[in-house]
Amino acid sequence: MDDGGSMRHRNSGHKRPRLEDVAAQVGVSTASVSLVLRGVPGPSERTRQRVLKAAADLGYQVDRTASTLASRRSRLLGVMVDIHSPFHAELVEHLHTAAEEVGYDLVLSTLTRTRDEQTAVETLLAFRSEALILLGPISPADTLAALDNKAPVIAVGRRIADAALDVVRTADDDGVGQIVDHLVGFGHREIVYVDGGKGVIATDRRRGYRTAMRRHGLGEHIRVLTGDQTEAAGEHAARHLLRDPQLPTAVVAFNDQSAIGVLTALTRAGVAVPGQVSVVGYDDDTLSRLSCFNLTTVSQNAQEQARHAVTAAVERLDQDRTEPREVVLTPRLVLRGTTAEPA
Amino acid sequence: MDDGGSMRHRNSGHKRPRLEDVAAQVGVSTASVSLVLRGVPGPSERTRQRVLKAAADLGYQVDRTASTLASRRSRLLGVMVDIHSPFHAELVEHLHTAAEEVGYDLVLSTLTRTRDEQTAVETLLAFRSEALILLGPISPADTLAALDNKAPVIAVGRRIADAALDVVRTADDDGVGQIVDHLVGFGHREIVYVDGGKGVIATDRRRGYRTAMRRHGLGEHIRVLTGDQTEAAGEHAARHLLRDPQLPTAVVAFNDQSAIGVLTALTRAGVAVPGQVSVVGYDDDTLSRLSCFNLTTVSQNAQEQARHAVTAAVERLDQDRTEPREVVLTPRLVLRGTTAEPA
DNA sequence: AGGACAATTTAAAGCGCTTTAAGTCTTGGT
DNA sequence: ACCAAGACTTAAAGCGCTTTAAATTGTCCT
């Protein structure tokens, strides 16, 4: 009668079943059960079947914390993401499948306004992540290098000078180069670039623009407008252009957000896109695919980056590679409706 | 000399420091160190200082897996999210701060094309989450109820009939009702609704529309166009409307995505918004805030929902509440630029 | 039947921490 | 001086699992 109190709680009495419970049910040792459940060869077929049945009957589910502790391996890859970024979302999706294929699990830690990289990474480490996959880290190179001493670090999406750690990224300069090639192919010459502020990525893209322009003998037409990563910056830059007597024939923006700002301002001013001005973004955001924008842009191939990141981690963990490796993928131009021949 | 091999690995020699290492450094027992590090009263101030210093010097970081195992508590809230949803992103952000305030941590498990709710939840349980916060679960009520037997479940954002578990959501019907009130206040009468397909949420919003229309004596003007949650559906619906001799004066869409489809199709057909037709969405997506859309919509107040979800979890875990509770918040109309008096 | 060898099974020692009961020291009162 | 009452400190027993060495059982020859 005295369980009146405990009966108020569900779960009372039968708590989570343990390995021992399964073992008792079958009449074997916990060692055997553990072996069967992990698929380690050894147990006889008969034992195997009976253990599997008992486990299913009891609804047994392994306790990660215990097995991590005992095996000294978590088989966990820690991933730091900006949960607001659609691109990161896509990366995570592919990281999941890639990790699963090699027998690892993912633990995510997100960046928010009140949660910086330091905190996010500490969380990952507290879970005993064996390697850290950092999506678009902004910490300085030496901080990352120091971190790499605790667990292999794979930086995704950002160039790191003289990296002592693994890096997987796309060639941002090449991406912008492809855009310029594409526009020049159409016959454009007056191509302006709306910048993305400071930061490694912005630097690379800006350089890509400059280099490509010069390569086409358009060095004198180089024009970089200050901006950042927001729609507002794009609008601002476009309004600036509209004040000039003569519009350029094409505008390349740091990213899709900014490009959409440009698009909005131009359209609002009655400028036809791509009739009078072509506009190009970068990232192949969900945004750029909306039919009302249908923005020509550059895709970073999330899937391939994810695969390389996981591979890099596995090489570090299971194949003791120690030399840092940098994987630079070629981005892919995505032609949509905002580019055409100049008027 | 024989450590040539092991020197190839970083981390060799000094692995992650343990409680024991800190204890040895200070010359006390691991028990004392544990006490100090967790802030449990008992240890003297002198010991406290020395332990803290040693821990910092060694770069000690607690091993969650071990402490979870030992204390039989993970202090972890498992959160299932759709990583592609901007709204979920916002919720997660607030869940983080809310959880931190009450001494819990979050572990995220994401839904993807290849990862269903079942899998996501299992991951959460494997980490020993003490409670499960499911954002927009689609599993049937009885599945969720069964799950609630393993760990308290808090369903966020979705109504669950006769719920035997905690629910935190906004009143979707009320939200759409507010939209209709707003439009009627402007003098609109021909208000059509673009539906969001099947699903509990779509049902509620549709009902909210119908009820509000009747409340205003506009029962005869009720008109629901089939649709779903996509931009394409909105475009499709709008094109349908454009075929009629006479356009309605206002269109209410299931969500922002769909509303933007409507907006795009109308604009493209030369219809002025809000001059000729007003358009309203739902969700207060990032999208709706873009200056080129500036969509009037309804906000679900992520912060408040997050707080309630965490509170519900804590009440279950630390204050043994056992009666299920449903928290229904009132959504908030966000007035922007796509609504005005009818022409 | 006896023994070598392979096939299974299991006892037991942890993994790094928490927790509680049982110390050990101080104090201060008498 | 002596003892009770704090104030600290710590030994030791797990938490639920993995892993390895050792034990047990079974099989096949000669």
Image: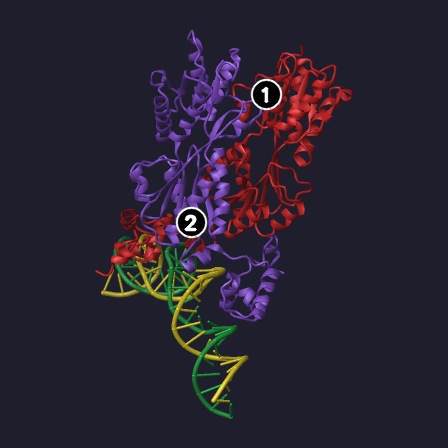
Chain colours: A purple, B red, C green, D yellow
For label 1, the SS is loop
- Mark 1 falls within which chain? B
Question: Label 2, label 1: how many angstroms apart (C-alpha)?
Answer: 43 Å
Q: Position of residue B276 (x, y in %)?
A: 65, 12
Of the pair A243 and C10, the residue shown nearer to us: A243
Residue at 64% over, 27% down: B175
- Placement of A154 over or under B232, stated as above or below: below
Query: Is residue B293 left or right of B178 when viewed as pictured?
Result: left
Tag 2: amino acid? Phe
Q: Are marks 2 and 1 in contact (CB under 8 Å)?
A: no
Mark 2 — on which chain does it sit?
Answer: A
Left or right: residue A184 compared with residue B112: left
Residue occupying the far top of the picture: A245
Vertical comparison of A127 with A233: above or below: below
Residue at x-position 55% and y-position 60%? A17
SS type, badge 2: loop
Residue that badge 1 annotates? B296
For the residue marked with disc 1, what is the amino acid? Thr
**Quadrant the C terminus of chain B occupies:** top right
Please identify the quarter of the rendering in which residue D20 is found. Answer: bottom left
| Image quarter of residue D13 | bottom left
* Residue holding disc 2: A127
Position of residue A103 measured from the top left corner of the image (x, y, whole percent): 47, 53
Q: x, y percentage for residue A77?
A: 43, 48
